[in-house]
Image (tube, grey):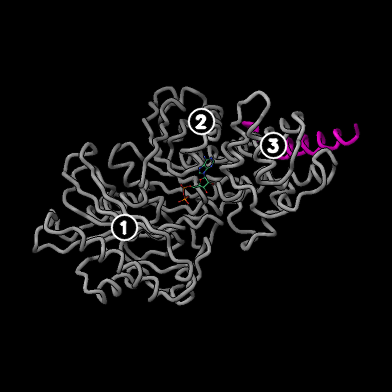
Amino acid sequence: RGNWKRVARVLKEVEEGCETSVGRLRQVVDAMAVEMHAGLASEGGSKLKMLLTYVHNLPNGTEKGTYYALDLGGTNFRVLRVHLHGQQSSVLEHEVERQPIPQNLMTSTSEDLFDFIASSLKEFIEKEGDGSELSPDRRRELGFTFSFPVKQMSVSSGILLKWTKGFSIVDLVGIDVPACLQEALTRKGLDVRVAALVNDTVGTLALGHYHDSDTVASVIIGTGTNACYLERVDAIIKCQGLPTTSGYMVVNMEWGNFWSSHLPRTSYDIDLDSESPNPNDQGFEKMISGMYLGDIVRRVILRMSLESDMLGPISSKLSMPFMLRTPMMAAMHEDDSPDLREVARILKGILEIPDVPLKLRKVVVKVCDVVTRRAARLAAAGIVGILKKIGRDGSGGIAGGRRSDMKMKRTVVAIEGGLYSSYTLFRDYLHEALNDILGEDIARHVILKVTEDGSGVGAALLAASHSSYD
Ligand code: ADP
């Protein structure tokens, strides 16, 4: 039937549009490394902001004491306490309290927001009782994870550049964020010092490094996506003469905003972008992260439904942006029942498309596969881009070193986020692409390690390594 041909044509076009051959991925790798250079060379030199963090030393396991962290970055707000015993990983204990951020605070004033945060910390500390391991003459110290783009002036100061993820507290833009928090803590009578301001990727890197000192970068692939890595200070051209003893600094790439003409872009991506609240922004993120993958798939199914009556009359749910969330998309993708029962259930239950024939259910699974595979492979190319920038992609480039003489160093990338940790096929595709791009001999030395609660625990670790008591 002509109808079927149309569905098949839409599918074929999506497959071609999402093509990620190894050759193309290598172009993305190169573009990532080039943009990293450009973003380090000058302010505004690239869509990659390459933000300085002033973190020169990462936790190594010798940290000792009790430290706190506040984690503000998305839908939940968390307070943590971390106990460090001075001997690496085995004895890292922490307690967490999560609570949703009241919707009205996301668009109120900075005073309201920080008073809420300070009150939560106060309650948390008051519940401690006398069992606290803190010596009474010592001020409490905390790391503040604030996962929005910040221009830092030091490890414990920085001004907010812009809000993302639905937050909009106008009076905080351009203001020193930790100073605001510090004032709120003082207003509540809390004697706590804000020792470090931390992006969530930097927290993840800190925790990864605490457990394994070969960790040189971290990647988050959840609702959004971002990465940071350890860079040589003399490669940070835009900021000459940074005083440092280690010679290194962690750079927050804000890689969600990466763009290159080599990225395989379809009409669905273009529509998603132009209908978003931030068009032309976060282009890499919109092809990769959990916030968007389900919606790309929904757009393809909608196109099929418009082209053919095999999916029945056009469902209004199918026309609704973000109706198909990524975990539901993943559930269809991972449906291994012979008659694709789960696919049928979700198409009917969520998108209100009943009685989809098996042949079409298979097409839907294929669409999920194409979109997820592209996302995972692009994320892998981004990771290899970082490795290339720091000379860990096995391609050599060190003066005087013959390739055959060079030993590839063990290289660990800390990784976090629901898309990577909960979506098996995404993870498998990402690993496969690393092998494809690097070759197995090199890829063997690159280890992706999942961390947990890194954004919070890592901030407490950084508070410890930036404590004023050492
Ligand atoms: P966040 O990034 O919001 O801090 P997470 O790292 O937990 O939180 O990531 C949550 C995101 O991960 C969700 O928005 C969703 O897109 C994705 N996700 C969670 N579970 C799954 C799953 N089982 N399959 C696919 N995607 C998932």
Pointer 1 and pointer 3: residues touching (CB < 8 Å)? no
Amino acid marked by disc 2: His
Say left or right for 257 vs 358. left
Please state, as top left, top right, bottom left or bottom right, where the C terminus lies in the image: bottom left
Specify few, some or many for label 2: CA neighbours under 10 Å numbering under 14, 14-19, or 20 or more. Answer: some
Say left or right for 57 vs 290. left
Q: Is residue 407 magenta?
A: no
Residue 422, horizontal then vertical, whole percent: 48, 38
Res. 378 visible in picture:
yes
Amino acid marked by disc 1: Val
| Residue 216 found in image quarter | top left
Residue located 52% across and 50% down the image: 223
Amino acid marked by disc 3: Val
Instruction: State the residue position of label 2.
Output: 431
Please state, as top left, top right, bottom left or bottom right, where the N terminus lies in the image: top right
Instruction: State the residue position of label 3.
Output: 367
Instruction: State the residue position of label 1.
Output: 79
Seen in the picture, residue 35 relative to 412 is either above or below; the reply is below
Residue located 69% across and 59% down the image: 275
- Magenta span of residues: 1-23
Seen in the picture, residue 295 relative to 162 is either above or below; the reply is above
Residue 370, horizontal then vertical, whole percent: 66, 35
Seen in the picture, residue 28 relative to 286 is either above or below; the reply is above
Residue 49, horizontal then vertical, whole percent: 50, 58
Foreground: 119 or 440? 119
Q: Secondary structure at mark 2?
A: helix
Q: Looking at the image, is mark 1 or mark 2 earlier in the sequence?
A: 1
| Residue 447 found in image quarter | top left
Foreground: 67 or 116? 116
Q: Looking at the image, is mark 1 or mark 3 earlier in the sequence?
A: 1
CA separation, marks 2 and 3? 20 Å
